[in-house]
Image (cartoon, rainbow, N blue to C red):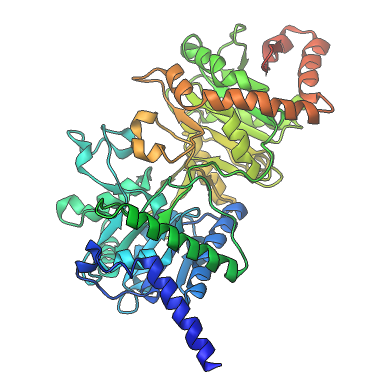
Amino acid sequence: MRSGNMALTTKCILLFSLLTGGLMSDSKSDKEVRHDVSVQDVVFVIRNQEHPFHLKRARLLKADIEQQCRVLGLEKPKIVLLTEKYGESGHWVIFPLLPKLGEHYGKPKYKWIFFCEEETRVKIPGLLNVLRRYDPSEFWFLGKELRDQAPSIIHHYRFHNDPSVFAFPDFEAGWLLSVPLLQVLSDRWKTGDHHMDFTIDLKHEIAFFIWDDGKGVKLTHVQELCSGNIGSNDPPSNDDDVAKAKMEKESKDAEMRRRRNKGKEKAECVTTYPIDMMECGPAVSKKNLYFAVKTCEKFHKDRVPVVKNTWAQYVKHIQYFSETEDKTIPTVVTGIPNTERGHCGKTFFIFDHFLNDAWLKHIPWLIITDDDTILSVSRLQRVLSCYDPETPVYLGERYGFGHTKHGWGYDYITGGGGMVFSRSAVQEMISNGCQCRSNADPDDMIIGACVKRIGQVITHSPLFHQARPADYVPAFLQHQTPVSFHKHSNGDPYQVYKDWFQVDDEKGDLVLDLQDDDNDDDGESNDLAQSKTEDKGSEEAEETVVTVRTDKHTEL
């Protein structure tokens, strides 16, 4: 029995050595100073979300890390899911958690904190091998670097003379702090004076805080941390033998690549992040999506036509909400004066309309957009396959406000990229007294504060974007399948739609519409809308709901 255990241990050591490249004695890395590190020295922090779908994905990542360690004969790793360990809102912002992370995982027990996203996958032996290059007693901030190519509004136009001088980490590739640096950051946050502020692009804001106006630590680029380097994550295996065979195959493949690329300094990725969009089943039918576009009179002639001639061609149910009647669109008149900022009154008018208008009551999803939002209907249909409209869902690009201490502040869906609500979510807000203080209140922030007050959560999708494509690092967008962008300024919105969304929407219009036709056994939505206009026969009804049939879509 003892000899059997020794044989098993020997096999694990050999596999571990292969996976880390430990047998490549002539490689450049073997001539460097190596620092001792084991899986017990690393805390794996998964920056997950509370929604059941996202929690399940995070637990799959945790199981994958644990399985790797079992197969390799390593100790059980320390893995933290933020929502399970720190349930209060704002945990995703990291800043208010720094004191707790420093207290719970500071030295001397640990050396490194590895942060990653739910869909990040990490090869444990490879990661440990990378970390051996860095002295864990020093201050290290490691990651895959991103650099702005132009000043960006989402980064507050920092480093506007040359934004490329500042590097910040791609969270999806994973990033690391040495524990000594974590302790310093923890102390700085505990003793610092933090004013209530917005969290917009956390990866840039984290790097800016750590840099500390040049007095702190810059990001060190690690080429083995990768993202967008696989199509999709493989389904997990519950069989350790199957997992072991897969790891052995990967190690042999990596060894062959090392031999082919000898002398070319090509690194093997130790982390992956998929480029493909996550889909959980059939795409949501177009008949189950209702789009409400917020507009106003001054944009009826320039912005609304862009919507109509791009993504609105591929929807079944859409209306345009304005303070002014315009039969050429046609608009739904809200009776609420237009405001330059906020639009809370208009948004809550849409909520009331969605809940109480008879022909809308069978539609489970509400999508509220601006009149300069550019999106892909097909991609949105696929994203929503992972969510249940019978439960409260508040989905979009998440921003934060006031997260200066753990549990303080609230999250909100920034409106420009599109806000998605299940019918259940809208019912929860209205039945619990959510309302505007004035028509000019910022609708997205009022909704976010209300969602926290009623004990529910905002769900973030990195595929929704508040800004233009030009405001994001190209390398970051290249490993995404975006759902939306926002704003027409300094660019051609038609070209943005053509470059990013048109092909998918045209393809989806052919494939998904056939599915809709097969499953559409009642035709209720179009018939209800048309009969509503015909039965009332009044000028008021004609102003409110007009059915315009085309070969591709129905506008209401």
Residue depicted at 17% across the width and 50% down the height = 213
Q: Quadrant of residue 426?
A: top right
* Residue lying furthest bottom: 2
Position of residue 374 in the picture relative to residue 51 (left or right): left
Residue 308, percent across and down? 56, 15
Position of residue 214 in the picture relative to residue 62 (left or right): left
Q: Quadrant of residue 508?
A: top right
Q: Is residue 122 above or below residue 520?
A: below
Q: In this figure, what is the number of numbered marks?
A: 0
* Residue 268 visible in the snapshot: no
Residue depicted at 81% across the width and 15% down the height = 531
Residue 118, percent across and down? 50, 55
Q: Is residue 453 above or below residue 152?
A: below
Residue depicted at 51% across the width and 87% down the height = 5
Position of residue 356 in the picture relative to residue 486 (left or right): right
Asked whether 457 or 151 is in front, the reply is 151
Residue 356, percent across and down? 73, 30
Q: Is residue 521 above or below residue 252?
A: above
**Quarter containing the N terminus:** bottom right
Q: Is residue 59 above or below residue 295?
A: below
Residue 60, percent across and down? 56, 61
**Quarter containing the C terminus:** top right
* Residue 124 visible in the snapshot: yes
Residue depicted at 66% across the width and 23% down the height = 510
Position of residue 519 in the picture relative to residue 369 (left or right): right
